[in-house]
Image (cartoon, helix red, strand yellow):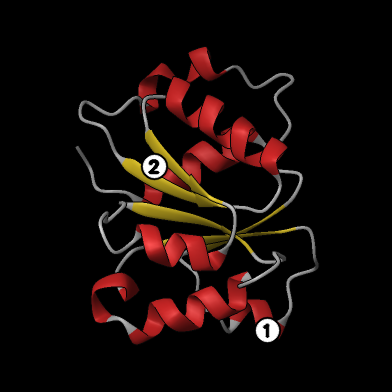
Amino acid sequence: MERSGDRVTAQAAVLPTREVSILVIDDDVDNREAFDDVLSEAGYQVVCAHDGAQALELLRSLRPDLILLDLNMPIMDGVEFRAAQARDPSLARIPTVVMTADRLTERILGLAPAATVTKPLKLSQLLSIIERHTPAI
């Protein structure tokens, strides 16, 4: 995630009045920590999972307002997670933003994400997508 030039403190206009919850699913610990730090500082409640299987376990007890999903992960990748999410009507309604370093392909677009962003992410782009796909508060 690129942070230079994009200050979270400059994003005060997107601070929610109540916490919007975001589930970040990414196998890279540095990415998870960066998302947690940046999104928490921007006023979001963040929960992280290291793969799709752990995320599905977390979703038994929490319903985030948005999911940020990496595609390339061990154990259960993003494609498998999206298939499991689609089979559960209560989970299928949660907007999911697919994050990938790969080129956008039919396979990725076929996952029917709320949005797709390529890595490395720009902070301003990510915050704009989150604002667009979470409930107005």
Residue toward you, 128 or 34:
34
Q: Secondary structure at mark 1?
A: helix
Q: Mark 2 — residue?
A: 131
Task: Name the residue rendered at 62%, 53% in the picture.
Answer: 26
Q: Earlier in the sequence, mark 2 or mark 1?
A: 1
Find residue 101 and report its horizontal and vertical position in percent. Answer: 78, 58
Find residue 55 and report its horizontal and vertical position in percent. Answer: 46, 60
Task: Name the residue rendered at 42%, 42% in the picture.
Answer: 47
Disc 1 marks a residue whose amino acid type is Arg
Residue toward you, 125 or 79:
79
**Mark 2 closeness class: few <14, some 14–19, many ≥20 residues within 10 Å:** some
Task: Note whether 115 is above or below 12 in the view shown.
Answer: below
Q: CA distance from mark 2 to mark 1?
A: 26 Å
Image quadrant containing the C terminus = top left
Task: Name the residue rendered at 72%, 66% in the picture.
Answer: 72
Q: Classify residue 114 as left or right of residue 121.
A: left
Task: Name the residue rendered at 74%, 20% in the picture.
Answer: 4
Find residue 17 and report its horizontal and vertical position in percent. Answer: 21, 26
